[in-house]
Image (tube, coloured by chain):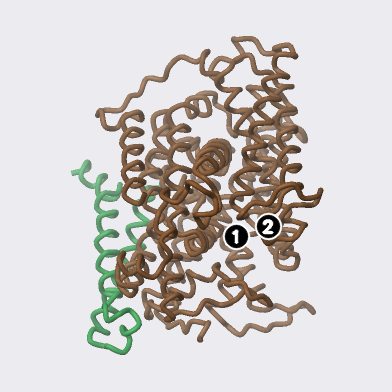
Amino acid sequence: MQTTFSLGTIDWTIILIYFVFVLGIGWALKRYMKDSSAFLEAGRSLPAWVTGLAFISANLGAIEMIGMAASGAKYGMMTVHFYWIGAIPAMIFLAIFMMPFYYGSKARSVPEYLKLRFDEKTRGFNAFAFAIMTVFSSGISMYALALLAQVIMPLEIDWNILGMHIGEFDFYLFVSAAIVLVYMVLGGLTSAIYNEVLQFFLIVIGFAPLVFIGLQDIGGWEGLKANLPENMMHSWKFAGSPDANPLGVTWFGVLMGLGFVLSFGYWTTNFLVVQRAMAAGSMSAARKTPLIGAFPKMFLPLLVVIPGMIALALTNVGSLELPMKEGTMVTDFDKVIPMLLLRYMPVGVLGLGITALMASFMSGMAGNVSAFNTVFTFDIYQSYIKPNKSDKHYLKVGRWTTVVGVLVSILTAYVARSFNNVMDFLQLIFAFVNAPLFAAFLLGMFWKRTTGHAAFWGLIGGTISAAVHHGFTLPAGASAGVKGGFFGLVNTYPSEMAQNFWTAIYAFSTALILTFMITLLTKKLKTDDELKGLVYSLTPKVKDDSKYWYQKPQVMAIIIGAIAIVLSIIFW
Amino acid sequence: MGLDIKIPIGLMFTILGLILTILGIVTAGDTEMYEQALGYNINLFSGIIMLVFGCFMLFTSQLFKKKKTEE
């Protein structure tokens, strides 16, 4: 089967027009970048619908687009748990309960909030871990883009520049990095956010025809049902026992592991997404950011999960052949989206679909670079390297950090290319560091007694317990190594997902218990006055200034919750 | 920020919408080209939707609001 596209002039024109607009936005924003706040915090001035769409778009990068389609093909409808039980409750919680502290405290980043609430070492730990994680994530996005681009847009590049061999992979890597670099240096966080909004609309409009035609081809929902096993067509029905469903997890694992620990940990403490809400123009807009994002988020499975299911159904009917992973007999589900684009899209919309994919990868890169900038400049440079300099100085540092961030990302993209296992291993370590973070926030925000020592050692302890759990368990069929089991084997899980969920549950519980106990043993160093605006009981309730009742965050939250429940029942 | 994001979004989708609509009209009836899309003239459909969306964004942007207040 043909595995490359033949792009027409029109397809290339569409891609070029997108690049022109992306760079144009950066150029138009340049004159507004007068201080470090404008560059690194978007001047805290954006409307809620812009930050709301950027909030979910920042997460809609390579891993989400490619990974969720692959999960759709592997786990079927159970993948929707990542949305309706995963993201939605966490986004509501962030909006209603946590945003008042993030936005109201005037902290410029998540690590800075940790410094205000706890102490210097907690901030330092989080800032360094986060900074390293973001450049690696950005590198993975770039790697995925270059890999995809060389497959779908073969240019037959074989240059020799100063003794260095430049192939297609290198060409696409440098071009995309250069574009992101230019628009980020020009417009900073605002550039990143504006391009995320642009990307959101491109993905919706570019992928809708793909899903529409794909569904028609398989015979609609009924056809999908007829050609997939029954346990792939339900989200909850087979969650009673881990052996009955493709995810290999029970309802408890889904609720606690994914719904509570992993999702709350990601959506409420990851600065990459929280930064979007903090860039909003007012407290009310900041609280509405995750809520406005939640509306489209609920319907994203239609665009990213269903294509995976369509591809598997087509394979079952025998009308599509998915490629194998290089050198193995394992189906490579990561190629689902490009395969479907190739199958259904004629010249024209094909260019649109590819543009949407590239936009998603590039803004995934830019999102990470923008978060890295802010954390590096404020939490590492200003705190540990050169404090008390002029604002102009920090603006300059922010700009140069962008350059460094992109360069390091290019490096990590090559690391990802040469040592696949190294990247898996790094992502694993980040998962260990992130899992207990939500415990520190939960106790810190709602229990004023929680001390800095307790939070710090809770984080360390939680991270270690995650590593220990992972080291003693393995998903079925895997051998000891990155997948786990490096300390020996105590338990085997039916799937990698199940193992991840339980690692998160152990890490969170350990961090929660440790933080609680150490708090009781240590002295509270911060006075109630210092904790004002940072802890629930010491902060006056925010009054919402929305004009209409349906614009109030609480009302929006109830409507979103109700829709998510109805969707879960329909696809039970 | 001084730049209204609706302007670049509106402009881009209007331009891309126009391109796809024209392509759709020119290639209408080309059954071979649209065979892979199950016979749907997908360029025309997508083009019109993008055109409508692009124009909507432009008309609700600062570009038109400013003019109104000046009048």
Mark 2 vs mark 1: same chain? yes
Look at the numbered discs 2 and 1 and tell me whether their residues touch, using CB distance below 8 Å: yes
- The front one of B54 and A28 is B54
- The front one of A97 and A355 is A97
Is there any visible trace of residue A37 in the rendered image? Answer: no
What is the crowding at mark 2: few (fewer than 14 residues within 10 Å), some, or many (at least 20)? Answer: many
| Distance from the alpha carbon under mark 2 to that under mark 1 | 9 Å
Q: Chain of mark 2?
A: A
Residue A93: % across, % down: 46, 32
Kindly state the secondary structure of the residue where label 1 is placed: helix
Count the numbered circles shown. Answer: 2
Q: Which mark is residue A376?
A: none
Going by the image, does A472 lie left or right of A93? right
- Rendered brown, the chain in question is A
Q: Which quadrant of the view contains residue A215?
A: bottom left
Look at 46% across and 53% down and name the residue there.
A78
Is there any visible trace of residue A271 in the rendered image? Answer: yes
State which mark lies toward you, 2 or 1.
1
- Rendered green, the chain in question is B
The amino acid sitting under disc 1 is Ser
What is the crowding at mark 1: few (fewer than 14 residues within 10 Å), some, or many (at least 20)? Answer: many
Residue A564: % across, % down: 36, 43
Q: Chain of mark 1?
A: A
User: Quick one: label 2 or label 1, which is nearer the N terminus?
Assistant: 1
Residue A321: % across, % down: 49, 80
Q: Report the residue marked by disc 1.
A: A141
- The front one of A238 and A126 is A238
Going by the image, does A500 lie left or right of B48? right
Q: Report the residue marked by disc 2.
A: A409
Look at 39% across and 35% down and name the residue there.
A288
Image vertical order of residue B20 relative to residue B32, above or below: above
